Image (spheres, rainbow, N blue to C red):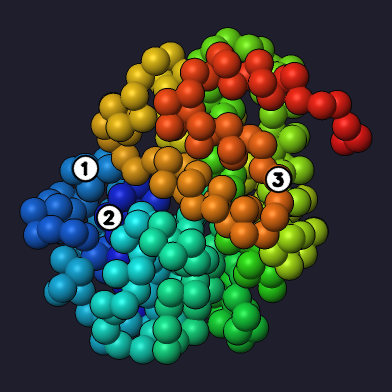
Amino acid sequence: MRVVVVGGGSWGSAFAALLRDRGHAVVLACRDADQARAIFETGRNPRYASEVDLRGVDAATVEEAPLDDAELVVLAVPSRAFGAVARGLRGSAPVLSLTKGLDPESGARLSTLVRGRAVAVLSGPNMAEEVAAGLPTAAVIASEDEALADALQDAINSATFRIYLNPDVLGVELCAAAKNVIALAAGAVDGLRLGDNAKAALIARGLAEMARLGEAAGAEPETFAGLAGMGDLVVTCWHAGGRNRRAGELIARGVEPEEAAREIGQVIEGLTTAPVLRDLSHRLRTELPITEGVCRVLEGVSISELVGSLMRREPTEE
């Protein structure tokens, strides 16, 4: 299969190598010519995931990438750029989205921004460095196009990257967006050294919050107990190198959100998604106390004050 992976970050680079190993002809489309040239000449990404061996993966700028000839376009770009990139795609190849978030301008699910072509989304506990190292990983592909989902499962599934199918595109995308916000809160628990009991409780209540939002939106409950829900939430909240968890930890220690993002050096999707998710919950008349709390901290409320207010909420049934 001829594939163009748009997005030269850590996940785009790791996924390009994964597709190459499955025998596909892959072009990694980057933002600028210097990055593309370095990948082409050295087989390494000079900016992100430099440990990933990209020999055998071609590289080009987005403008020069062979999108018209591609049989699949993979989008691995930040949520804030997804809409513009999707609108600017040439050709008619189906799209596989790897981006986990919501559109910050409209609040829409990202797959809905892809027009005039088939689209699928891939999600799950997929830390890029572990995928690149060939460690065992599982993911789900969701699409309303059953034939596309089947074809992608066959094209991507391997002995180290197991693919399951899930027709619940809505649920998978909501899980992918919401888990990053919960991970910010989990990082804050780490930053405040509140202990594993508190962190496990937050993750469990975070999952309940995600499922409650999904139910209000019309998603399938089973999705939230699966790889896209619980699986991705657990690894994002616990993985030491997870950028959202790390950002929450830094913020809890007094670092401003913008400075935390600069220190980490990569996009922190939870920072973009938190207010969008909160607005969606308001439209759906659904309570998301953890998400609301994250937004309040990002708006300047003391995190210690927030922890106290969450613990003092009126007791209720689980």
Looking at this view, is 4 or 54 the one in front? Answer: 4
In this picture, is 317 found above or below 63?
above
Q: How many marks?
A: 3
In this picture, is 158 found above or below 238?
below
Along the polypeptide, which appears first: circle 2 or circle 3?
Answer: 2
* Local secondary structure at mark 1: loop
Q: Residue at x 21, y 42 (%)?
A: 47
- Amino acid type shown at disc 1: Arg
In three-dimensional space, the C-alpha distance between marks 2 and 3, rounded to whole angstroms, equals 36 Å
Write down the quadrant of residue 190 in the picture. Answer: top right
Looking at this view, is 19 or 194 the one in front? Answer: 194
- Amino acid type shown at disc 2: Gly
Image check: 234 left or right of 197? Answer: left
Across and down, in percent, residue 240 comes to 50, 26
Quadrant for the C terminus in the image: top right
- Dot 3 alpha-carbon crowd within 10 angstroms: few under 14, some 14 to 19, many 20 or more: some
Residue marked by disc 2: 8
Along the polypeptide, which appears first: circle 1 or circle 3?
Answer: 1
In three-dimensional space, the C-alpha distance between marks 1 and 2, rounded to whole angstroms, equals 9 Å
* Local secondary structure at mark 3: loop
- Amino acid type shown at disc 3: Glu
2 and 3 marks in contact (CB < 8 Å): no
Residue marked by disc 1: 47
Image check: 85 left or right of 230? Answer: left
1 and 2 marks in contact (CB < 8 Å): yes
Residue marked by disc 3: 287
Q: Residue at x 42, y 89 (%)?
A: 116
Q: Residue at x 69, y 69 (%)?
A: 168
